[in-house]
Amino acid sequence: MGKYYKFPRRYYNRNKVRKPLKPKHVLQLVLLSLLFYFLCSALFIGTYRAGSDSMNPWCSSQDTLVGLRSWCTRLERGDVVLSTPTFYRTAPIWLRALDSAVQVCTFRILGLAEFFGYDTGYTAKRIVGLPGDIVKIVDSQAYIQIQGTSFFLPESDLGFTGKIIPSDVDMLKNVPPVKVEEGCYYLLSDNRNFLSDSRSMGTVEKKRIHAKVIYRLKGIGKQ
């Protein structure tokens, strides 16, 4: 008879009392979440909504750029990168680390760095000059003297892009030759009417280049 009243093995766990969630379990969950986030961020920077001004017509306001971290890939001429302008105030390391944790928990809804008055936005620019190059702008077209050579090559010969929008501003049409310092890059917009690039703010340090764009997601209804 005793054998008749035994519950099947699959019902044994029904009467077990659930243990309360301890603080150490919460801490372990948070640490695992942060570890997963930093491992992912070591490869991907996430998504960036492209503006219709800086890289027009390469991308539109409906496109989304997806970038790869710059330190794990080599930067070449013609690459489109996400960078922060030199006039942006960079948040301290502790605030950026805390901001990353908060953005994970809030799905990027809340940003502490922006709350404290620091700029966290990116701009999409194209790398025109590498360290050691000399770059000049003539009639909105870039000419590059590669390190070790004595002549300038137009950007079209280097295969950058054939969709450059010339500038309407005289001061942006012609820029005297500039030598790119070591550890810096010369960045330009495909839309040369856009002011915030190396023509106005000078060369950009590598630490301000956060990601290299490897592909873009087109907007809904676009071919």
Image (tube, rainbow, N blue to C red):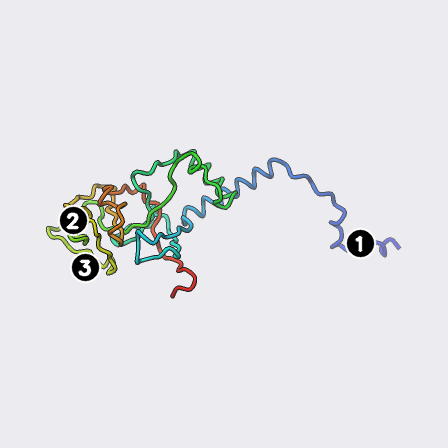
Q: Position of residue 90 (x, y in %)?
A: 36, 36
Up/down of 22 relative to 188, above or below: above
**Label 1 SS:** loop
Mark positioned earlier in the residue sequence (1 or 2): 1
Up/down of 3 relative to 175, above or below: below
Per the model, the C-alpha gap separating discs 1 and 2 is 87 Å
Question: Dot 1: within a 10 Å radius of its alpha carbon, few (fewer than 14), some, or many (20 or more) residues?
Answer: few
* Residue placed most toward the observer, 103 or 181: 103
Q: Position of residue 144 (x, y in %)?
A: 17, 51
Residue 157 — which label?
Answer: 3
**Label 3 SS:** loop
* Residue at which label 2 appears: 174
Tell me: 55 left or right of 112.
left
**Label 2 SS:** loop
* Residue type for callout 1: Phe
* Residue at which label 1 appears: 7
Tell me: 50 left or right of 39.
left
Q: Position of residue 177 (x, y in %)?
A: 15, 46
Q: Quadrant of the C terminus?
A: bottom left
Q: Position of residue 16 (x, y in %)?
A: 74, 45
Up/down of 196 relative to 62, above or below: above
Q: Nearer the viewer, mark 2 or mark 3?
A: 2
Per the model, the C-alpha gap separating discs 2 and 3 is 19 Å
Residue 158 — which label?
Answer: none
Name the residue located 21 percent from the left edge and 41 percent from the top edge: 181
* Residue type for callout 3: Asp
Question: Dot 3: within a 10 Å radius of its alpha carbon, few (fewer than 14), some, or many (20 or more) residues?
Answer: few
Name the residue located 74 percent from the left edge and 55 percent from the top edge: 10
**In the image, farthest residue toward the right:** 1
